[in-house]
Image: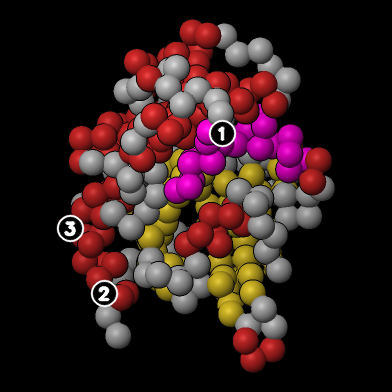
Amino acid sequence: MSETTPLPSVHTGRAGPPAGAVAAVGLSKTYGSGATSVAALTDVSLQVPAGTWLAVMGPSGSGKSTLLHCLAGLERADAGRVVLAGDDISRASDRVLTRLRRTAIGFAFQNFNLVGSLTAAENVALPLRLAGARPRRAQIRAALESVGLGDRARHKPGQLSGGQQQRVALARAIATRPAVLFADEPTGALDSAASRSVLGLLRRMVDGGQTVVMVTHDPAAAAAADSVVFLLDGGIADRLERPSADVVAATLAGLERP
């Protein structure tokens, strides 16, 4: 196994990381208490430089979703620090976290979270409206076209397939041009052609300076990223840089063996 990339010290303020960087130091998270407690994360440290793409993999129950949620400020770790988009969010107020969600970060999760009564275009525009902006029609159209749904702008979620709903959710996440995009299985509901399209879109985002943190079970999707972190029992077991899909699959299989 390869060695985990050493972490530089994490700072905040003017001397801190670029706005698109994500860093964690010593993250630990336990669910429950006593004999029934489960350690989801144990002393996890990692850094995602601005303008790069990190894939997170691991067996079921390894802590992938918990790590993603803690990095995104959706859950608070019991110990450790998270610096997101230039802000230390470890003990940030709900007001600060809400501001970050509206201005600096985007989410694309498995359950889509689309509003059934709104059209695809209205769903894409919703985060911008909640942030007090007046989205331009061309801006919303461009986001939908980027995921191959320019002709579905007036369709409601119930009129779209699961894969199409996934792509609407991704269009919504990128419409605000977030500094950091957190994605949970963004290709999980897609066929191979649509999956390649979404991965190409994520690569263009990263090449344009945005940062992507993605949980995936698909070795091909992980191989599209710049780095892949493997979790096992709540800790980092390995980290690979620009691996092939075959190497990703072999590394994951090695972790899953009893």
Up the image or down, 108 lies above or below 201; here it is below
Up the image or down, 83 lies above or below 179; here it is below
Q: Measuring 37% from the left and 16% from the top, which residue is drawn there?
A: 150
Pick the residue in front: 108 or 163: 163
Magenta stretch bounds:
96-116
Percent across and percent down for residue 113 are: 54, 41
Task: Give the image's coloring scheme.
Answer: secondary structure
Taking the magenta stretch, the answer to whether it contains residue 229 is: no
The nearer-to-camera label among 1 and 3 is: 1
Q: What numbered label is drawn on residue 254?
A: 2
Figure quadrant of residue 82? bottom right
- Inspect the image, locate mark 1, and give the three-letter code of the amino acid beneath it: Val
**Image position of 179 (left or right of 149):** right
Please identify the residue farthest to the left as the structure is shown: 246
- Inspect the image, locate mark 2, and give the three-letter code of the amino acid beneath it: Gly
Figure quadrant of residue 35? bottom right
Percent across and percent down for residue 85 are: 63, 39
Q: Can you identify the residue that label 1 sits on? A: 115
Label 1 SS: loop
Q: Measuring 29% from the left and 67% from the top, which residue is drawn there?
A: 252
Q: Can you identify the residue that label 3 sits on? A: 246
Mark 1 crowd level (few <14, some 14–19, many ≥20, 10 Å Cα): some
Q: CA distance from mark 1 to mark 3?
A: 38 Å
Q: CA distance from mark 3 to mark 2?
A: 12 Å
- The reply to whether discs 2 and 1 touch (Cβ–Cβ < 8 Å) is no
Label 3 SS: helix
Q: Earlier in the sequence, mark 2 or mark 1?
A: 1
- The reply to whether discs 1 and 3 touch (Cβ–Cβ < 8 Å) is no
- Inspect the image, locate mark 3, and give the three-letter code of the amino acid beneath it: Asp
**Image position of 210 (left or right of 150):** right
